Image (cartoon, rainbow, N blue to C red):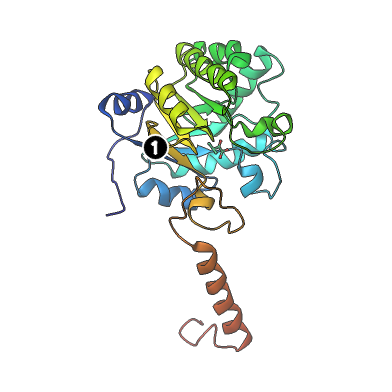
Amino acid sequence: MSVHVQNSRMTTARLRQMKVNGEKIAMLTSYDFTLASLVDEAGIDMLLVGDSASNVVCGNQYTLPVTVDEMIFLTKGVVRAAQHALVVCDMPFGSYQISEEDALRNAVKVMKESGCDGLKLEGGEEILPIVRHMVQAGIPVMGHLGLTPQSVNQFGGYGLRAKEEAEAAKLLRDAKLLDEAGCFSIVLEKIPAALAERVTKAVSCPVIGIGAGNKCDGQVLVLHDMLGLNQGFKPKFLRHFASLAQEVKSAVGDYINAVKDSSFPSTEESY
Ligand code: KIV
């Protein structure tokens, strides 16, 4: 059975309870109404309007170019689709690093205009005052540690993070600080599974992994990647749960042939 029907809206309190109960949390990205409706109907717990929209939707190499207004536009469609899932929107690069005041102004704008349930921010101790500011304003904040794609130019690539003890110790400390600051959840991206397990045990909020092993409280993947729509991208942590690129190309090929040989539209498909 592939559909997990839930009859009420997901909340941050319920996610916390899922961690306590040892019930795994499933999260996927979404960027539009149509696919988000299907993912929500299938029973996903959380929908993330990731700034990966910059790559997936806009075709950029990095997540950095996407803007607050573009994220709001995409998130509105996902919010309209979500009957059950909690919808989180990524705060894009530059929208929360300038000052606490600017960060809160942007955060309030995204919450008000998109209607999402929470915001995700990349970083640890460096952004702690901003996280505290948002939490105090009543905004549910999700942290994001490990490989944080908005810092790709500093990292020099998308390699595994926190392999060395010093970076691993900082990541563990950052996770504890984000938890204490009131984050409702933390994403851990592309770090050793043993470190992700330590972090998951050390914090009270649910930890969602991507390329972080299976001991986290939940998992997240980019929807287009797990559906096999993006054939050129297959890192070790990614599982293709479908091969939709082939299906799409084959359907489009059939359509082109039917148009070219005049078999579409048929008499039944005409007025
Ligand atoms: O933008 C995104 O898709 C993300 C996930 C990879 C966690 O941040």
Task: Identify which residue, 115 or 241, lies in the foreground.
Answer: 241
Q: Find residue 181 and report its horizontal and vertical position in percent.
A: 49, 12
Residue at (57%, 29%) from the top-left corner?
A: 163
Whether residue 135 is visible: yes
Looking at the rendering, the quadrant in which ligand 1 lies is top right
Task: Identify which residue, 204 or 67, lies in the foreground.
Answer: 204
Helix, strand or loop status at disc 1:
loop
- Mark 1 — residue? 214
Residue at (42%, 41%) from the top-left corner?
A: 82
User: Image check: 11 left or right of 155?
Assistant: left
Q: Find residue 137 and report its horizontal and vertical position in percent.
A: 52, 13
Whether residue 115 is visible: no
User: Image check: 138 left or right of 25?
Assistant: right
Residue at (63%, 85%) from the top-left corner?
A: 260
Toward the front, the furthest residue is: 165
The correct choice, above or below, for 118 with respect to 48 in the image is above
Q: Find residue 211 and report its horizontal and vertical position in percent.
A: 50, 39
Mark 1: few, some, or many residues within 10 Å (few <14, many ≥20)? some
Amino acid type, residue under disc 1 in the picture: Asn
